[in-house]
Amino acid sequence: SQELEQSPQSLIVQEGKNLTINCTSSKTLYGLYWYKQKYGEGLIFLMMLQKGGEEKSHEKITAKLDEKKQQSSLHITASQPSHAGIYLCGAGLRSGGGADGLTFGKGTHLIIQP
Amino acid sequence: ETGVTQTPRHLVMGMTNKKSLKCEQHLGHNAMYWYKQSAKKPLELMFVYSLEERVENNSVPSRFSPECPNSSHLFLHLHTLQPEDSALYLCASSQHRDRVLREQFFGPGTRLTVL
């Protein structure tokens, strides 16, 4: 089974609307990362969350971490065409931190309709 | 150059060829990673190098051979690949210190096609 489940798998939103993407882990989270990827390109780092209840914002994107639920959400306010792409959540699933490869979800494909 | 760079950006090779992918990070980081992104599958970790030593090999076939000559450079040597190895190969780096999780920054990737 998938260690990190993202929902929805795809999302079509009208420009200007708000949206939320969720990421749920089947294991204890040791850090949760959000990235954005343009099709066939590298990942752009958005935010990293480490502590339960932590919330970070960058421009119109806000991410929260619910440690008890082993879940994170990414919220975009007043979506714009530039928000279109694939959003990936990645997590460290082993304690100890340090140089640790990340486990990723399958991604959420976001399309913004004008 | 800034951030993480990868060359080549696109590579087409036959199953009997030998080629190498190169990654260079300009961030002063001490940990580097190789990931594989195949169609319809999550991004998969392949190798982790910390302070130029391989600390993880995520059950990757021996036809993939990593090399980390210094903290700024990471290579992935390829030989006798299979068509199912066609994928986007991504390199990442991070600063590893005090066993605290740090941000990982990714390169643009190399799109590999094996014929």
Image: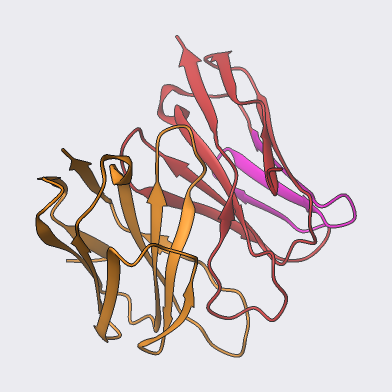
Chain colours: A red, B orange
The spot of residue B17 in percent (x, y) is 9, 55
State whether residue B103 is above or below residue B73.
above
Residue A57 part of the magenta segment? yes
Q: Determine whether B39 is above or below A45 in the image.
A: above
Q: Residue A52 lies in what quarter of the image?
A: bottom right
Name the quarter where the C terminus of chain B is drawn: top left
Given residues A36 and A30, the one toward you in this image is A30
Look at the picture and state if B47 lies above or below A27: below
In the image, which residues are magenta?
A: A53-75
Residue A17 percent location from the top left of the image: 62, 17
Q: How many marks?
A: 0
Left or right placement of residue A17 versus residue B72 in this view: right
Q: Quadrant of the N terminus of chain B?
A: bottom left
Residue B13 is situated, as x and y percent measured from the top left of the image, at 11, 46
Image x and y of residue A104, in percent? 57, 50
Give the residue displayed 35% in from the left and 32% down from the top: A39
For this view, does A66 lie left or right of residue A89? right
Q: Residue at x 35, y 88 (%)?
A: B52
Q: Out of B70 and A75, give the one closest to the viewer.
A: B70
